[in-house]
Image (cartoon, grey):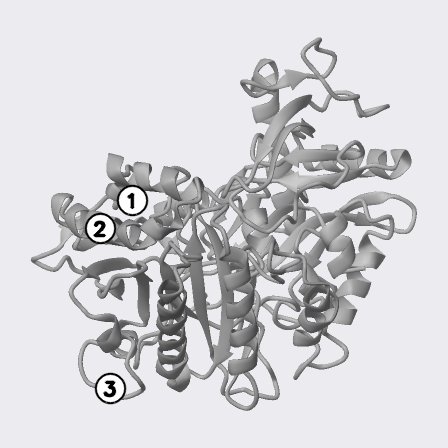
């Protein structure tokens, strides 16, 4: 289907929704524009016909909370154009708002003035989806959720091989931060055409954004063959997508087996170690995730595999989120969280034991040790009700043959540091370690002519190291407001950056999580933000397509910086 018709579909779909729901334009609990219930000054000259209301904002980990900020819900891409030109004319900024499932303050920064900022909720109306079976692509509005998109793809025999765990994410939000899954090809596997094991951004064949055309902001469609699209494939909120077209591949049935009886020293052994190692499972199936609760011996290992036929021991599932015990915590866990947030960090070992015990009991009680179903139903397992934790860590870019060494080194370091802090009566970490792997954003995976990989994706290949074909994601979680947690994350970040360097690996941030840690807070280390991170995207890539050219593209397409905030101004000046 021509791209113009795709855009018209999205606009028409959104317009139909808007016409049918005009009386429901203001969400429950919000104060509409003109109401006596509003408490902050209204933006002047706001475009008529676009619902505007005062609403609360809260990110995933509840570390960024605003009791009131002006929010609107455009009903079409043309409404976004009107908003952009209004913001430019009136000295405002507009920030796209999706599911708010993120940690990084790319939407709102704690403490920054918001009197000249309006949030744009993309999920109310800009959520149309159309599948094009003829060329195995899907076009989706910015606010369409991953779950909704994958359901429509599944209905047409299509799917994605590598997706994030939360299905609630909006597609535009996921693309902004190069969201990814936990999948590599198994040894000897031949993936179907249209598959990529990198970020969702590498699936894009074209996108439509609202950009400056030299006179005003207007809609512009970028094809994957255009060099100008590359910085937009993962943009950190520095542009505004209204719709995107992504490729897909043949859908698959999968099996997911859980293991809770493997000791961490066996699981995270050195390359070639005997036993049930993370490396051996990756070789067999390509798809594994380890969740290692603190102060416990056995991680929870999930192993996915392609399985066209149902194994006799597996339980068939027909929908996602098949670990309900992770969304309904026992009373003792809730009590322990309360004590942690009150500063009683010494209970961290008990907290880890409770979560491990809850996992083992829950897997047994719900028959979730061995599951089988369509790919999306086994890959989506995090709901908005899942325990809200903060995260630090990032991606180690290396060759697949180094994965076991990367994981071994990190887990040995982590265990030693946690033991040290415990020996001096400190417990800065109380959440699990998460270990996953995925592939890189290989341009050869793209089924249309491609100008290259997403410029500032963490999974962008390094031409000077073509053997670096794998991203190893190492994250550590914790209960927000735990004393000493950010100082630990800073120590960990600095160790990872120093250790995974040179000829065998490099370290990159996970844009949606915590990075640039000071001893007190994330996103506060000016040297990391202004020098180290930009240099990460200058090393080993052409000068014609690096951090600086991406920044120049953003500034050309949005010279008035209506799509920015104080953190983005510092990171991408």
467 relative to 350 in the view: left or right: right
Q: Which mark is residue 250?
A: none
Which residue corresponds to mark 1? 326
> Does the CB distance between marks 1 and 2 fall below 8 Å?
yes
> Which circle's residue, 2 or 3, is located before the other in the chain?
3
Farthest residue, direction top: 36
Splitting the image into 4 quarters, where does residue 218 fall? top right
Q: Is residue 500 visible?
A: no
> Which circle's residue, 1 or 2, is located before the other in the chain?
1
Q: Is residue 292 visible?
A: yes
* Circle 3 SS class: loop
Which residue corresponds to mark 3? 273
Rendered position, 461 above or below 57: below
Counting from the top left corner in percent of width and height, residue 345 is at 39, 50
* Circle 1 SS class: helix
Q: Nearer the viewer, residue 468 or 507?
A: 507
Mark 1–mark 3 distance (CA, rounded to whole Å): 32 Å
Mark 2–mark 3 distance (CA, rounded to whole Å): 27 Å
Farthest residue, direction left: 312
Counting from the top left corner in percent of width and height, residue 423 is at 36, 66
Q: Nearer the viewer, residue 248 or 107?
A: 107
98 relative to 223 in the view: left or right: left
Farthest residue, direction bottom: 503
Q: Residue at x 63, y 51 (%)?
A: 2
Q: Residue at x 15, y 43 (%)?
A: 366
Counting from the top left corner in percent of width and height, residue 306 is at 26, 65
Which residue corresponds to mark 2? 359
Q: Residues within 10 Å of mark 2 (few under 14, many from 20)?
A: some
Q: Residue at x 53, y 71 (%)?
A: 441
């Amino acid at each position: 289907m021509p791209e113009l018709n795709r855009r018209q579909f999205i606009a028409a779909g959104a317009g139909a929704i808007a016409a049918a729901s005009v009386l429901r334009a203001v969400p429950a609990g919000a104060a509409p524009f003109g109401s006596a219930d509003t408490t902050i000054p209204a933006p002047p000259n706001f475009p008529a016909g676009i619902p505007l209301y005062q609403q609360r904002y809260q990110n995933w980990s509840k570390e960024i909370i605003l009791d009131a900020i002006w929010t609107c819900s455009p009903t079409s891409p043309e409404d976004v154009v009107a908003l952009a030109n209004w913001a430019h004319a009136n000295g405002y900024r507009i920030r796209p708002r999706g599911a708010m499932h993120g940690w990084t303050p790319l939407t709102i920064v704690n403490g920054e003035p918001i009197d000249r900022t309006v949030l744009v909720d993309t999920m109310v109306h800009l959520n149309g989806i159309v599948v094009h079976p003829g060329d195995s692509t899907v076009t989706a509005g910015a606010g369409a959720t991953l779950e909704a998109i994958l359901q429509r793809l599944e209905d047409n025999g299509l799917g994605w091989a590598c997706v994030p765990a939360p299905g609630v994410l909006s597609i535009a939000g996921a693309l902004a931060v190069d969201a990814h899954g936990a999948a590599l090809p198994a040894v000897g596997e031949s993936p179907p055409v249209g598959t990529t094991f990198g970020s969702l951004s590498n699936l894009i064949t074209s996108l439509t954004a609202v950009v400056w055309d030299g006179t005003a902001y207007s809609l512009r469609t970028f094809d994957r063959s255009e060099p100008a699209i590359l910085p937009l494939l993962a943009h950190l909120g520095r542009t505004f997508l209204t719709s995107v077209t992504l490729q897909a591949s043949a859908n698959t049935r999968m099996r997911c087996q859980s293991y809770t009886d493997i000791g961490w020293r066996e699981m995270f052994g050195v390359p070639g170690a005997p036993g049930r190692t993370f490396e051996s499972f990756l070789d067999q199936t390509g798809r594994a995730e380890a969740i290692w609760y603190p102060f416990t011996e056995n991680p929870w290992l999930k192993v996915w595999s392609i399985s066209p036929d149902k194994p006799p021991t597996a339980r068939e599932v027909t929908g996602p989120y098949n670990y309900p015990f992770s969304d309904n915590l026992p009373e003792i866990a809730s009590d322990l969280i309360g004590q942690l947030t009150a500063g009683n960090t010494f209970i961290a070992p008990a907290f880890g034991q409770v979560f491990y015990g809850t996992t083992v009991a829950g897997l047994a009680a719900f028959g979730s040790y061995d599951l089988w179903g369509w790919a999306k139903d086994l890959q989506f397992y995090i709901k908005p009700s899942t325990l809200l934790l903060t995260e630090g860590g990032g991606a180690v870019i290396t060759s697949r043959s180094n994965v076991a060494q990367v994981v071994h080194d990190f887990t040995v370091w982590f265990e030693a540091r946690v033991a040290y802090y415990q020996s001096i009566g400190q417990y800065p970490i109380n959440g699990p370690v998460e270990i996953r792997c995925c592939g890189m954003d290989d341009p050869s995976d793209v089924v249309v002519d491609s100008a290259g990989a997403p410029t500032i994706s963490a999974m962008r290949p390094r031409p000077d190291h073509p053997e670096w074909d794998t991203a190893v994601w190492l994250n550590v979680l914790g209960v927000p407001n735990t004393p000493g947690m950010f100082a630990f994350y800073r120590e960990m970040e600095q160790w990872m950056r120093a250790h995974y360097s040179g000829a065998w690996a490099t370290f990159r941030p996970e844009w949606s999580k915590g990075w640039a840690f000071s001893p007190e807070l994330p996103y506060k280390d000016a040297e990391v933000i202004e020098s180290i991170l930009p240099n990460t995207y200058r090393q080993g890539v052409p000068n014609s397509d690096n951090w600086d050219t991406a920044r120049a593209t953003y500034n050309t397409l949005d010279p008035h910086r209506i799509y920015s905030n104080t953190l983005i101004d510092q990171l991408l000046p």
